[in-house]
Image: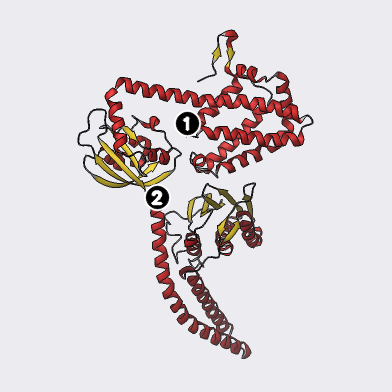
Amino acid sequence: MTLLYYARGMESRGDELKRYVRFTDEDATLLASFAVHAAPHFRRIAQEFYERVREHEEAHAVFSSEDQIARLQGSMVRWLEGVFGGVYDDAYFQKTEQIGRVHVRVGLPQRYMLSAMALIRSSLTAVIDEKADDAARVGDALSRLLDVELAVMLESYRTDLVSRVERAARRETTHPRRAEKSLEHYVQAVELAPLLVIGLDAAGGVTLFNREAERLTGYARDEVLGQPFVELFVPEELRASDGARLASASAETTAELPLVARSGKVREVRWQVAPVADGDEGGAARFLIGGDVTEERIARERQQQVKRLAAVGTLAAGLAHEIRNPLNGARLHVSFLERALAREGGSAEALEAVHVVGDEIQRLARLVTEFLDFARPQRLVCAQVDARALSERAIQLVDAAARAGHVTIGVDFPARPLTFDGDAQRLEQVLLNLLQNAVEALVPKGGGTVTVRARREPRHVWIEIEDDGPGVPPGDPSIFDAFYSTKPTGTGLGLAIVHRIVTDHGGNIDVDSHPGRTRFRVTLPLERREAEV
């Protein structure tokens, strides 16, 4: 869609709206002259805007990745540059219209469009009040332009709604029996059930889509009716196999199959297929009833791991006691032997052998201590933790080694404090271990860059350590397992302890690695329930 033109004088929609709000050439000049003062604040405003988005689940749910958010922040900066560009012709408002269509396409609720413009208006007004000589006139000019911008963006929502209503009307006109049958099916499916209920026709097209399905997928009901279920919701690599079998099942069956939401996020869903015995043409041939088991699976795996570690911890405590006693005795006698050889002029080979034995005994003692840290359940001491302060403390501890190895450590944190519930001491151990690994991976190649960044999501906070090193060797899914190490002198317990601490917090850690980029991301809940502590 392009900007509409009116018959009278061929006035475009943008010109008509500017005339309506009394936006003049003088206003355009005022905004253009203020651009040099406003531009240094654009990136900060864009960053703060998306930090606010992260606090709200329904708004944040439309984003598929951090890369997408970074691109959108860049787009917002370019849009702000245009706001103070001084040229507000048809081409300018066509770009505004495109922004509105993007918001419709990704499923951003209209109310967030309104509140978003209010946030941007407030941030820019604060800059104008501080920097402008004639703040009142510049602020009024900005307000009038943003009113036009908002009207043009909202037109996309109106156009989309009209299009959807027209499609629904055509369906009812073409298939009156189908509309009646669809209403009956919605009643049968119990609209408010906390399960996805999706009806499919004989060809696999969607005929029914309940409220929970809308919530989990991010699609409105009328957007998916008639669309092929498999192509819309099943991961591409599973469409021809598991997806096709689920969508065409003619008997009652259960299966677990991932579901791709509108944002691109994937949820694990346990499906039950219920064929419709009296399904007719145009109606549902089968119902897919699904329960989101993503969090259930994560919680189950975490609980199983806790039980295993508790059992291992009990064994480890007794075993460590039995090992430490002879180790301490051996270390004492090795020290005695070393002093005796030195005093009596023993050979260099004998002294070197004693040194090796002493070093190995110390390594064994350190291994026992690390194993206890990994296996023994430990109560967390949780309080409010600031992600930036936590990361900066860990960075200080590895700074000397990083500089010696020509490794640069950069940070990327939100403008505002990012706090959450956690055990600061143990989480510092997590970040320190990940940072040490990143630095050690870069030193052999002569240096590189490590980046520590943190972000908030509606219910979680994540901190990630990224380096541009060689990456984790391919085919190594066991890096978090105890006693698994890619280092010649490693104990194989560092990442296992990291994993244990993160899961004790009710969080998770994942790794994405290929040559030239390795990223460890630690995701933690903003608030911890008392039962988890």
- Residue furthest bottom in the image: 344
Which quadrant holds residue 184? top left
Q: Where is mark 2, residue-wise?
A: 294
- The type of residue carrying mark 2 is Thr
402 above or below 350? above
Most extreme residue toward the top, as rendered?
8
| Residue 430: % across, % down | 55, 61
Q: Residue at x 54, y 35 (%)?
A: 112
Image location (x, y in percent) of residue 416: 64, 48
Q: Is residue 33 above or below residue 517?
A: above
Q: How far across and down, in percent of the image, does residue 276 sit?
A: 23, 37
Q: Please name the residue shown 62% across and 38% down the image.
A: 46
Q: Is residue 165 visible?
A: yes
Secondary element at tag 2: helix
User: Residue 520: image x %, image y %?
Assistant: 52, 54
**Up-down relation of residue 38 to residue 367 (above or below):** above
Q: Are marks 1 and 2 in contact (CB under 8 Å)?
A: no
Residue 486 seen in render: no
Q: Residue furthest right?
A: 133
Q: Which residue is mark 1?
A: 105
Q: Quadrant of residue 167?
A: top left
Q: Amino acid at mark 1?
A: Arg
Q: Nearer the viewer, residue 257 or 13?
A: 13
Q: Nearer the viewer, residue 485 or 248?
A: 248
